[in-house]
Image: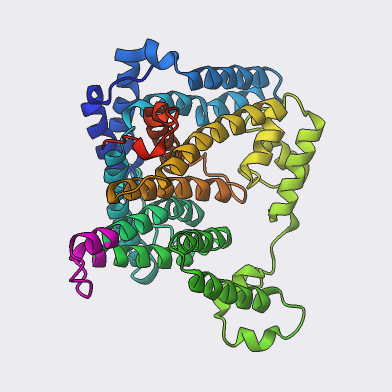
Amino acid sequence: MKIPSHLFKKEQLAVSVGLTLLPFNAVAGLLPLLFASLSPWFFHGKKLASLPLAKVWAALTLWFLLTTITAHDRGEALLGLANFVPYFIVFLAFSQVICQFKQLNNLAWLLTANTVVLIIFGFGQIYGDWATPNWLAAIGTNLVAGGRPEGRMSSLLMYANLFSAWLLMVFPLSLGLLIQCIRRWHFTAPSNRLNPPPLVWALLVACILEAIALVLTGSRSAWGIGLLIGIAYAIYLSWYWLVALAGGATAMVLWASFGPFGKEPLRQIVPKYFWGRLSDELYPDRYTTALRSTQWQFSWDMFLDQPIFGQGLRNFTPLYQAAMNVWIGHPHNLVLMLLGETGLIGTGLMLGAVGFILAQGMMLLINLSRCSGFRRQSQHLLLLSYGIAFAALCLYNLFDVTIFDMRNNVLGWIFLAAIAGVSQRYGAKLAQGNPAKLEVPG
């Protein structure tokens, strides 16, 4: 049963306030987000608990508790529940709070704006040695001069890779807003196409800054995924010339990095920052235990050793440290981590639930694509942008794990809840079998 969205005005405002503060201070952002997620449970708990996905998350919670009992280190497994179970509760609440296209649009603008501020801080830390005073660092607002690690933009997040994950989620939203604003400009002022309004210029600058920041994070997986995001929008706009150009540039960089012959002339053209990072020649002294391939193999061996229950949440780190005599926080692949720590059933439930939500979103996306009119096209583009943003996060988690960072984890679950919310709100309309008559207000 869908709860009317007008009952959540305060919670919707709290989400906006929380996401405004979240990247700058996790604790300050968490407080309004906690209100927005717990208030619906206080007033509409029975309805939330009756949602179909509530049963899936409950089953997954029970399974995680069972794997805690059989875990190698039960204490670590209990701590690991905090990275999942609270977010199941948050998801169910936010899928009711965030369920209108106008909310998705407002959140996209908000995230674009505060991410530009994050990028300004990032440029300051890299080129101006900006750093927050100790008292700000003590309360969770920490800007490290030079970046963390040194030379890589991390802004106010704990590490450059975490900032790159944040950028990958916001970059598609900014591109979507830019395309939407250009379309609105052409739609409302067809005779004035040579004089873009200020919003178009502002969004263009924001997108360029986000792309530059992605490069400066030094994350190779973020570079690749960022390129895929650009290609996805180029295909959406039928700019196949840009796809060909991106493919050619990518081939050149890859050949300069890994080519078996003839790569030296290309290395005179391609900046060393790219081919040196991709080929690992910038860091030639890395130990085997620090390689992702080693960590992935170890996670797979954990799964083969306990394929049903896994070794328990957060148990990769102590087991890897005991075997390799080195501390690694996670195996840099979320799927392999889930397989090794929660077994096949836990991983299947998690991937199945997320896949079901994305399938619902895809159905709505397909039906919106069959509708005519500027408003429907804008809604289609907005939902597509959120889908690309969440897909980018999923791809990134094949090469890293972001769930241990509260900011990225919260934002990822909010995106998933938003996709579920709009899909559930308008899902009944799809059953009518005539997408042209689909009514999607707000």
Q: Nearer the viewer, residue 266 or 2?
A: 2
Q: Position of residue 50 (x, y in %)?
A: 44, 13
Q: Residue at x 42, y 47 (%)?
A: 369
Query: Please, is residue 261 above or below residue 287 in the view?
Result: below
Q: Quadrant of the C terminus?
A: top left
Q: Residue at x 23, y 22 (%)?
A: 7
Picture residue at 72% right of the left edge, 86% below the top: 262
In magenta stretch: residue 185: yes
The N terminus is located in which quarter? top left
Compare residues 181 and 437 and report the one nearer the observer: 437
Q: Is residue 317 left or right of residue 57?
A: right
Measured from the top left, where is residue 124 in percent x and y?
33, 66
Judge whether 100 appears above or below 147 on screen: above
Q: Please, which colouring scheme is shown? A: rainbow
Q: Residue at x 71, y 47 (%)?
A: 295
Start and end of the magenta stretch? 182-201
Q: Tell me which corner region of the image, top left, top right, bottom left or bottom right, holds residue 43.
A: top left
Q: Quadrant of residue 204?
A: bottom left
| Residue 30 percent across, percent down from the top left | 33, 34
Residues 191 and 383: in front is 191
Relative side of 206 to 66, left or right: left
Q: Is residue 190 magenta?
A: yes
